[in-house]
Amino acid sequence: MSFFYKPLSEISFTDIEFLVQNKIRESYDLDYKLDYPQNKNLAKLMISFANATGGYIVIGIEEEKIANKNTGIPKELKGVQKGDHSTKITQIALGHTQPKIFPKIKIIDYEEQPQKVIVIISIDEAPEPIMYFHMNDSDSNKFFIRINDKNEPADQVLLKKLFSRRPFFEELKQLESKITKEQKLIFDDYFGPDVGGEYIFFGFSLFPYNNNFDIINTNDKDVEFFLKDLYTKLSHRSPSREIKDFYHLIRNLSYNGDSYSSYYRYTGEKYHEAEFDIFSNGNINTYIIFKPRNATNLISESHKEYDESRKAEYAHSPFFYHDIFPYLIIMFLRLAKSIFKNKVEGRFKIMTRIMATHNISLDVYEFLQLSSSTDFSIKRTLYFNELMDIEKFKIFVCEILKEFLRYFNYNLKEVDRYLEIFHAAVDRYIS
């Protein structure tokens, strides 16, 4: 998704082609126009982005249609005639916004049609709410906001949030920091000096980029029933006896005032603890603690290959069965797919974290390898439509697995080769 991770000045015609070829649909931060809409409608569109998390308007792209209505899916590059686009767009923005917004504009030559260009309008998230102004429009003095792929006038509830919010990406950064600290506190408390044992902490967080506006009505009984029924759709058996089946995480959800939560503890031969929370704004936060086997028995088996000089470290290392990581990642992403279908478009950020009391041993192709760290995180951004497309889903999961393998000192060539062992697990859990 290079389009969204480049400065506007570096976006090229190839990046625009990528959007069309991969059918990247409109979302909370992306809108397509075949040509310029009416001035007042373009102003409302720019305002809606500014009042959300910012975004891009790409002019010169035709959308696919159903029953003569745009679907938000790009069909073909068309371009618009060359002209003084920067002046036109800037005048519309300055003439109909209060406080003023200043769009960034990039004009890209249409390589196949020299007389045409593609126009990109980049809108930053505004530090304060932006009001629409027009002397001859009944919508004047309203605050528009981007919700999924639509521009909506803010009602009283949204207005209250608009005027009390902090910039979204600042808030997301603070939320990530808060979760990271809380995870460490849980880990340190759980694995204090008097506890002992080889434990693994696995944390998973997911954040839809929706600026904290509600996408789940926690007061809706149908939503409550749906959430509680989700475990029937996530019935894959855990690949390891050390972890309970995934549906244990969500089958006992209860509403606690600001989120649906599920928590359990199990004390026995092995110790398990897990907590799952889903909030009305779509944020998911969870962790699992488990005590796996250590690698002592594995290194005593003659067919296992390992670094003999680190034998003592293996004796204390928790053994991470290679199927566990893809299992947990895919189950959480399948959960997100079920919850947010038809509710949200656009991007998500996921954050996974693994902590352990000792370096973790991983068995790949009969070769035992120790991790290079006892605390590692993987962060990725994905589009919701990547969850809906099986092949893109697989590619996304494999990219996460590649980074996971690199924590075990595999070089790039080895990672690509060893990744093959995960493919069967990925196919099994995605289906």
Image: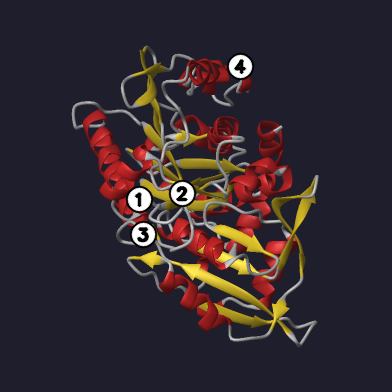
Question: Which is more toward the observer, 425 or 61?
Answer: 61
**Residue 12 x %, y %:** 63, 78
Q: Quadrant of the C terminus?
A: top right
Q: Amino acid at mark 3?
A: Ile
First in sequence, mark 3 or 1: give its number. 3
| Residue 232's disc number | 4
Q: Residue furthest front?
A: 136
Tell me where residue 151 appears, x and y as whole percent. Answer: 52, 51
Q: Which dot, 3 or 4, sits closer to the camera? A: 3
Measuring from the top left, give residue 311's x and y in whole percent.
Answer: 42, 44
Q: Which residue is mark 3?
A: 130
Q: In terms of secondary structure, where does tag 4 sit?
A: helix
The residue at the point 80 percent across, 82 percent down is 112
- Tag 1 near tag 2, CB within 8 Å: yes
Q: Secondary structure at mark 2?
A: loop
Q: Are marks 3 and 4 in contact (CB under 8 Å)?
A: no
Question: Which residue: 40% across, 40% down?
Answer: 155
Three-letter amino acid code of the residue under disc 4:
Thr
Is 414 left or right of 306, judged from the image as shown?
A: right
Gap in angstroms between the C-alphas marked 3 and 4 = 44 Å
Estimate the spatial distance between the alpha carbons at disc 2 and disc 3, rounded to whole Å. 19 Å
- Give the mark nearer the N terminus: 2 vs 3: 3
Horizontal relation, residue 268 to residue 71: left or right: left
Residue type at mark 1 is Leu
Residues at marks 1 and 2, CA–CA distance in whole angstroms: 9 Å
Task: Name the residue beneath numbered marker 1.
Answer: 172
Label 1 to label 4: alpha-carbon separation: 32 Å
**Looking at the picture, which amino acid does disc 2 mark?**
Tyr
Which callout, 3 or 4, points at the residue further toward the start of the chain? 3
